[in-house]
Amino acid sequence: MNLIDLPIHDLRQQLRSKSISALELTRAYLMQIEASNPQLNSFITVCGEQALAAAATADNLLAAGEAQPLTGIPLALKDIFVTAGVRTTCASRILENFVPPYDGTAVARLRSQGAILLGKLNMDEFAMGSSNENSHFGPTRNPWNLACVPGGSSGGSATAVAACQAAATLGTDTGGSIRQPAAHCGVVGLKPTYGRVSRYGVIAYASSLDQVGPLARDVEDCSLMLQAVAGFDPLDSTSVDTPVPDYGATLKKGVKGLRIGLPREYFIDGLDPEVRSAVEAAIATYRQLGAEIVEVSLPHTDYAVACYYLIATAEASSNLARYDGVRYGLRVDRGQGLIDMYSASRAAGFGTEVKRRIMLGTYALSSGYYDAYYLKAQKVRTLIRQDFLDAFEKVDVILTPVAPTAAFKIGEKTADPLQMYLSDIFTIPVNLAGTCGIALPCGATADGLPIGLQLIGRPFDEATLLRSGYAFEQATEWHKRKPELS
């Protein structure tokens, strides 16, 4: 088997036994990036020289017996993470040449664990999108079908794992931006509970919803990545000071006796028949493994998409006010005064979808409309969160599809923003509730496109999610499928 096909837990063994070196492994990934990126456009920036230098250091640590859990493992990051000395664009023209002076907390924790940074990955501009078509650097393509989207906004992160361009990646999830692209690309993606992973050094889209999480080849790799980045951070006021369990210790406990809830509101008429069939087969697998299947209700689900787009756009309009052409980023100065400079810089620097969301959010927060829209949406959000807490009185995990369909064609939904927004209908409620969810492969369409299964857990109970996902993986072969790139 090719080195780059192996999961992290196998690579760690080979690095420690000296079967391979970190330099050899890093060169293999860089060659794969060079060969496949012209087709996929998943990387915005490749850090070849820095990665090889870090690999040489990793080999010295391995030889000295001083390896950390991820020493010598080549990873890549969504280009929303601030990285010292490495360009961080957020896929926007307005930050095209921004080079940060420091690492965000999640990045620093990966580096302290010995990980090697291969580069920064393509995404929807400022994480706004469900298809990865809203990037200043062009769309990323799905490795299973180059005519299709990989999902968004962490489409580059999912593509890089599926196409073996990195051992694993980090993404961010505001309304499903880890889980939806993971499902469309056939990899595992975890959105931890809000507050589990620090957001310090992550460029903000919607601050009360954004959360950092891993995308990986299998559930065990996902648990290793979460273990590396989770935990309290005094630099992030929303970080929660609660113990981080040893996820590996409970991974193989199985699901016998576990109660899995099926929310009736998620199995709707608009669900694609192939997606429904794959998810029903997954439910049957869990029954065979000894789990108890229970019907539950999340009655405010219908309001989730509207509620999300009011809250997210309102927070985005506030967060993106800092890009004014003065403090950092692009400046377009026409010499006609300060306000004209602000307007010209933002008009030239932001793409169409970002401008749409800024205008929607500004309207929702404006005088006379705040109570009617933003405040009402926050009240609905409380009801949605209570739905989940009530359901978790009856079950340990909730099972749903990740998305109503498999990956769609590039350009298919760009003319209809509402249809695009509905791509996240099954993932958005998890962000509004602030709890955790994981997507993992559970089937394929007749055309070979991956289909994803979503498991939703109690707040800060990622251990049960990982345990449930691992049990499904051991009983099926879907996570072993790989795309064939020409």
Image (tube, rainbow, N blue to C red):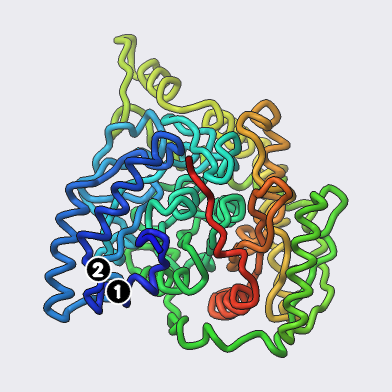
Q: Is residue 81 above or below residue 259?
A: above
Q: Is residue 373 above or below residue 236?
A: above
Q: What residue sits 69% from the left and 62% below the top? A: 382
Amino acid on which the number 2 mark rests in the picture: Ile
Residue 253, label in figure: none
In the picture as drawn, the residue positioned furthest to the right comes out as 269
Residues 387 and 261: in front is 261
Q: What residue sits 60% from the left and 66% below the top? A: 437
Q: Is residue 486 left or right of residue 469?
A: left
CA gap between label 2 and label 1 equals 6 Å
> Does residue 268 show up?
yes
- The local secondary structure at tag 2 comes to loop
> Does residue 174 show up?
no
Q: What residue sits 39% from the left and 39% below the top? A: 37
- The local secondary structure at tag 1 comes to helix
Q: What residue sits 41% from the left and 36% below the top? A: 91
Residues 159 and 422: in front is 159
Residue 305 in percent (x, y) is at: 71, 48
Q: Determine contact: label 2, label 1, CB under 8 Å.
A: yes
Q: Is residue 89 left or right of residue 420?
A: left
Residues 110 and 72: in front is 72
Q: Is residue 50 above or below residue 391?
A: above
Amino acid on which the number 1 mark rests in the picture: Gln
Residue under label 2, please give it: 20
